[in-house]
Image: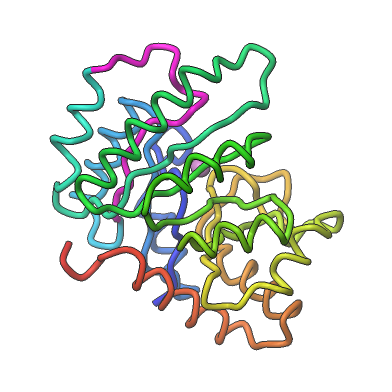
Amino acid sequence: MYIDTHCHLYKEYYNNIDDVINECKEVGVTKFIVNGCDMRSNIETIELANMYDDIYAAIGFHPTELADFKDEYFSWLEDHINDKKVVAIGEIGLDYHYNDTDKEKEIYVFRRQLDIAKKYNKPIIVHSRDSIQDTLDILKEYKLKGSIHAFNGSLEMAREFIKLGYMIGIGGVVTFKNAKNIKDVVNDTDLSYILLETDSPYLTPEPYRGTINSPKYIPLIAKCIGDIKGKSTTDILRVTADNASRLFDFLNK
Ligand code: NI
């Protein structure tokens, strides 16, 4: 039983979710945390989790999807945080990549969601792009646990997040030739702090870059990590699945 801890299996990207899940089963990937990003995808994520045994939901509001954000969405989040199969608040965080970024709004929405995570004792799934120092500084104020998804910071930063109680989400980027930084992080990070994820439909691993991503590529990411750490693909898949099971409370869902 292998796990994709971060993907977006929405209808707009995949014609047939049954096919995706069946292809994944063939390679042993049998558990998925689908992350919402805005109101529409959050609702869809909960629907998917109710429809498919293997799908679990993370719900939250993504920093680049706040154009039509309303304060009442926080109460929606609270109303659904204890829904069956909702295992985390995500995808939430900070993204300073674009020139028109409203940092203040992003930080406000991020903090309010962290408050909710704290209130309900839920893990979080964190997106951080060009914002890693602010992300770290804010998370230091909260005693939470979760995943730093698609981690792309330095080894030093990875250690800081681990010290706070977070795990490091590693996906397709680790297979890219020029991803020296992430390969270094993987090499130096104890396997007990690593989670596997695909971020499907984005960030497709080699050799399939340029095509749509799928959680069926989780074993490819595991193989790459295994090559870096001198371990078998099966060991990587097994240990990281155990890590995910420790972090996300699948059993009681
Ligand atoms: Ni994502």
Q: Residue at x 48, y 82 (%)?
A: 238
- State the image quarter where residue 117 is shown: top left
Q: Nearer the viewer, residue 175 or 88?
A: 88
Q: Is residue 176 magenta?
A: no
| Quarter of the figure with the C terminus | bottom left
Q: In the image, is 65 to the left or to the right of 152?
A: left
Residue 162 percent coordinates (x, y): 54, 64
Residue lying at the far front of the rendered structure: 141
Q: Main secondary structure of the magenta part?
A: loop
Residue 103 percent coordinates (x, y): 55, 20
Task: Give the total number of marks visible in the rendering.
Answer: 0
| Quarter of the figure with the N terminus | bottom left
Q: Is residue 79 above or below residue 188?
A: above
Stretch in magenta: 56-71
Residue 30 percent coordinates (x, y): 38, 69
Q: In the image, is 119 to the left or to the right of 17?
A: left
Q: Nearer the viewer, residue 34 or 132?
A: 132
Q: Nearer the viewer, residue 3 or 126?
A: 126
